[in-house]
Image (tube, rainbow, N blue to C red):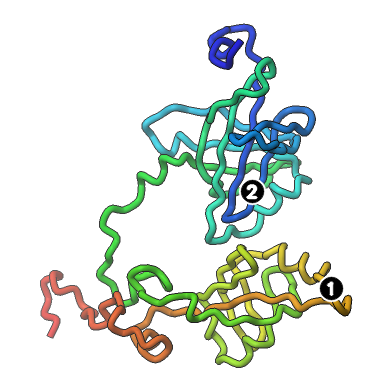
Amino acid sequence: MTYADIESSPGEGRPYYLYQFIEGDQLWRFTSRATDWLSAGSGGEPIAWEAAAVAHGDVVQTSEIERGRLELTWPLSHPFARRFLAPMGNTPVTLTIFRGHEQVLGETVAHWKGRVVGAEVEGVRILLTCESVFSTLRRAGVRAKYQRLCRHALYGRGCGLEIAHHWQTGTVTAVSGNALTIPEAAGHPDGWFRGGVLRLDAQLGFITGHVGSTLTLSRPMPELAAALANPELDPETGDPLPVLADIAPGCDLRAATCAAKFAKLANFGGFPEIPGRNPFGGSSIV
């Protein structure tokens, strides 16, 4: 008996679901089955799925993108779901839901795919809001804008800056929520790293504030706190090793900053001399 045979039967189906989340290099797998489960990967290697009290709403096939959203329900105490209650970072979290039947545990089909866009608490539950992969069709076709500030993303293609040339390694000495202390940051003027990037291994964080040695991130990074609480030990001396992170400076998208801080004025994507009056408003602009 195959998945297709059971799926076409009105009474034989006993479906279960597999939920795979990916954020950068991190991967989490959960199943709606009552116990943890091992499935076989494409190469025959075992793949572990953790049992969780997770469920989702109906999958709707519609041409209206907003109606294609999906909600996942988690217990309030689940640690994976709680991480989304903090502001989300720059790396998207993709979700793929696989559907199978208990009678044919080795066969599943991709049931839904999208990304996590928000979370909220409702009573004793956490609701994760996900939007379909087809929501990417809402992207703007013409992205260049006529504006005073630079229209390019820092370290992006239009900007032309190579972030690899701007990383500075620092030692994380304290973490409190989304604020952390890196003494090396104090060697630059306040605000130097605001709008920049922090990197811890494969994890990236957006820096929203910089005063002295204190950096503020857009959301907490639990990995930083965990690294400080349980530091790696030097194999020779047994002493705790410092927790190192890379930081790259930010930009306020102004022409003066582009020239003085990065010497990239030729790539500046803004138009700082836009007149303050609308030339099409009917009044003189001179």
| Mark identifier at residue 58 | none
| Residue 197 image offset from top left, x and y in percent | 54, 73
Question: Which residue is at the far right?
Answer: 238
For numbered disc 2, what is the local secondary structure? strand
Image point (25%, 70%), residue name = 146
Is 47 left, or right, of 131 in this rendering?
right
Q: Are marks 1 and 2 in contact (CB under 8 Å)?
A: no
Image point (58%, 16%), residue name = 3
Is 177 left, or right, of 62 in this rendering?
right
Residue occupied by mark 1: 235
| Residue 22 image offset from top left, x and y in percent | 59, 48
Q: N-terminal of the two: label 1 or label 2? A: 2
> Which quadrant: the C terminus?
bottom left
Spatial distance from mark 1 to mark 2, Cα to Cα?
A: 29 Å
Could you tell me the amino acid type at mark 2? Leu
| Residue 71 image offset from top left, x and y in percent | 58, 37
Residue occupied by mark 2: 27
Q: Quadrant of residue 103?
A: top right
For numbered disc 1, what is the local secondary structure? loop
Q: Quadrant of residue 233?
A: bottom right
Residue 53 lies, with reference to residue 179, above or below; the image says above
Could you tell me the amino acid type at mark 1? Pro
